[in-house]
Structure formats: C-alpha cells, structure tokens
Image (cartoon, helix red, strand yellow):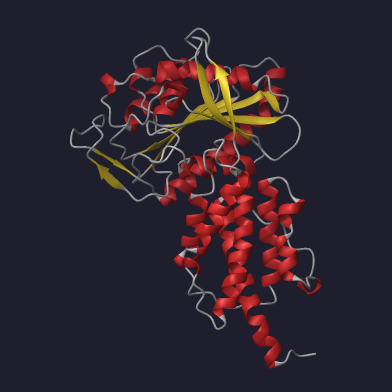
Amino acid sequence: MEATAQDDAQRSPNRTAVTALADTVSLLAAAMSLRAPAVTRPAATMTRPAATVSRPAATMTRPAATVSRLAATASRLAATVTVPVADMTLPATAAALRATALTRPTAAVTLPAIAASLAAAAIHLPAMALRASAARGGGRIALAVLAAAATLLAEAAQAEPVSIPLADGAELTAHWLPGPAPGPRPAVIALHGCGGLYRRDGATLQARYVEYTARLHAAGFHVLLPDSFGSRGSGPICTVRRGERTIGAEARRGDVLAALSWLRQRPEVDPQRIALLGWSHGASTLLAAVNAERTGHAEVAGAVAFYPGCRTALAQPFSAAAPLLLLLGADDDWTPPAPCEELVARTRRAQPQADIAVVTYPDSVHGFDSREPVRFRTDVPNGVNRAGVHQGGNPRARAAALAELDRFLARILDAAPARQARGETP
C-alpha cells in the first residue's frame, strides 16, 4: 500500500536523519579504515530504525566491530529512505568527531564524560545543520544517534595507560591499545616524532596516531604508543636545535627495547610477531634499534620508517636485523631522502639477502602521510635550509604509502613465525 502524503511528511525527518547518519558513519568508518560488512538482510525487515540504531552500544564491546556494524545498519536503513543531503558538510562533521575521539585517559576523564563531551560537540557542529524540510525533527534524531556513535568512538579511545620499567630504573609511560581480535595477535610499537604524541593541549592524541591506531586495529594488530618525551618531563622538541636536545634516538632506543620486553610478557601478544613503526625522530630511533651491528639490538618481525633522519645511521656500521621499509618524500627539506637512499644501497651491497626496501614519493615533503596542508615552518632549525622547512600532506603519496605499509605488515607479521621456525634470519 502506498504511503499517504501525511505519513510521508511524518517520516521525512526520520528519512533525513537516517540518511545523514548513514553518510556520517560511513565517513567515520572510512576514516578508521573500516569497511561495513555486506548487506545480507533486506531493508524491509528493519521496522524500527531509531531503536535498532541505538542498541549497538549495549550489544557490542569492541569499537571496530561496533562502528562497522553501525555503518552497515545505517546503510540498510538508508536504502529505502534516500533523501538528498548535498547541503550537509559531512566531511567536516566526520573530521570534527574524529579529531576529538581519542582523548588521553586520566582519572578525571571517564568514558561517560568523554561521550558527553563528544555529544555536546556534535550538537554544536554547524555541519549538522540539516536544510531539508522538517529539518528540526530530523536534526534531533540525527544528533541523538550521533551521540550514540560518539559513545562508541569514546569507547575506542580508552587506551590503557601503562608504566614500563627502563634499564636505568626510570619508567616509560605508554598507551596500550589492544586490538579487537581475540587470542595472541601481532603488535605494533608506534614511535612518535619530534612533536610528541599529543596536540597542543598536552592531552589529546594527534590525529596521526588516532588514525594509524584505528588502521592497525582494523588489521587485527595491537598497538603500543610509548610517550618518550612526557615520560622524561619534556614536550615537543622540533624547535630545539639538534645539538641542544636532551632526548635523542639513543635514549629512545632503550624505550623500544623495554617496550618489546613488556609486550612479550602479555598473553594477548604473539611474541614472534611484533613490528616497529616510526615517524621522523621516531623513525630515526627505529633505525638505531634494529641496527644489528650493535649489541642488544631489537629483535622484531620488521620495521617501517616514515621519513627518518638517516645521517647518524649512515655514519656508523649498519646492518638490518629485521625486514625494513623506508618511506620517504622526494622534496623533504627537513630529513632529506638522499642519506636514507644511500644507507639502503650500502646495506644491500653488504647484505645482498637483506629484506630492505625504500620508496621515495615525488612532490612530497616531511609529513606527507598527514591530512594537513603543506606549510613552511620557520621555527624548525634542523632542516636543509636555515630559513625553515616544509611540512604537510600529499594525498596521493599518503594513499600509496598506506597501501605499502599494509602490504609490508601483512607480509612480515604473517611470515614471521614460519621464518623463525626455520631458523632464518631477516
């Protein structure tokens, strides 16, 4: 039976809201590198949209599965209630929610508080202004469901703060973010750059670490984020001259070894499948950690370095103790690619069988994997030019590098147990 005009008018807010939710959650899922499962149930069987969408928080405990399930549900509902939402700036909505999703846990910041904060942020987002007819009713419903989505994202934010003993008796603070998959799983130690883990507020994780954590979780990997600077009472060091820095790759090398020891004691971690991932200063730390020419090097399944500074490694004897991938920007004037390319070439000559690769992306500067626009920083004194350095993203290089990262991690973390059982070295 065809719906009457009155029934249609009453349902239009729901239609607008559900369609908006579908688009928004899909964007959020994409931002977290999640794919909604295929639709297997016809939309006609979904008779109570509001109740159906509001229940996942009570039935799902893992954030990746929850967001993916929510996206699928919203897509099914929207299949029969399509309403144009061209006037909604959904990318801005998704970006705003994503930017506030992962907040550094403290005793004063509980899950309900984070959820409430996110819900309040959603309510005040100009992007949520619905311009369709009956927009006010639709907006209320959309915001209510977005608040539920915010709760789910807040659940994903609850990293477990841990203290890891260091060799010198001090302690390393880290964020432990176990992945959604059960059983012993691979883990990735992610090493921050010279800007540290947090935004300017000193509490909110930078978008890079939020997004990479979600990506690694989607692949089934646990994530450990050591805070090498905050553990030593320091903030960012990007603007400090290299010779005046009190925290260098050598100190952070000890952080890597301690983090490895800690992870290997975790029952949910497969000790043979631990990888390193680092950016800039953290990538230089990574190179120091996997240098097999040094006593007590890190024994890992593999390592990925985004735009490291390679001059120190090039000035020393170096051989790769693990499969190694370097991802560089051709126009990087902060940590130029040439020393890294030379390091890889020299290592290949000395280790013909070494699993070591370098990819240099054209038209790309330092931080090419970020979503931020390129800018010129005059406050950084450690680049090629005294005047400053360029920093910012290149969407094409970012996409290519993420695909390269995914392939590399899948290969080394799947192959590590078999390789080690055969007694093979990297």
| Depicted 265 relative to depicted 211: above or below | above
The residue closer to the viewer here, 13 or 272, is: 13
Number of marks in the rendered image:
0
* Residue 290 appearing in the image: no
Residue 147 picture quarter? bottom right
Give coordinates of residue 195: x percent, y percent: 38, 34
Q: Residue 277, how many percent across, how many down? A: 51, 31
When the figure is inspected, residue 94 is found, relative to residue 407, above or below; the finding is below
Q: Is residue 119 above or below residue 264?
A: below
Dividing the picture into quadrants, the one containing residue 302 is top right
Asked if residue 306 can be seen in this view, the reply is yes
Decide if residue 386 is on the left or right side of residue 205: left
* Residue ranking furthest to the left: 387
User: What residue is drawn where x is 40% and y is 11%?
Assistant: 317
At x 27%, y 20%, the residue is 244
The residue that appears at 54% across and 54% down in the rendered structure is: 118
Residue 76 in percent (x, y) is at 71, 68
For residue 377, above or below residue 260: below
On-image quarter of the N terminus: bottom right
Residue located farthest toward the top when viewing the structure as drawn: 295
Q: Nearer the viewer, residue 227 or 58?
A: 58
Relative placement, left or right, of 120 versus 248 is: right
Residue at image x 55%, y 83%? Answer: 133
- Return the residue found at the far front: 108
> Viewer-proximal residue, 106 or 84?
106
Quarter of the image that includes the C terminus: top right
105 or 271: nearer the viewer = 105
**Residue 384 appears at what percent x and percent y?**
24, 32
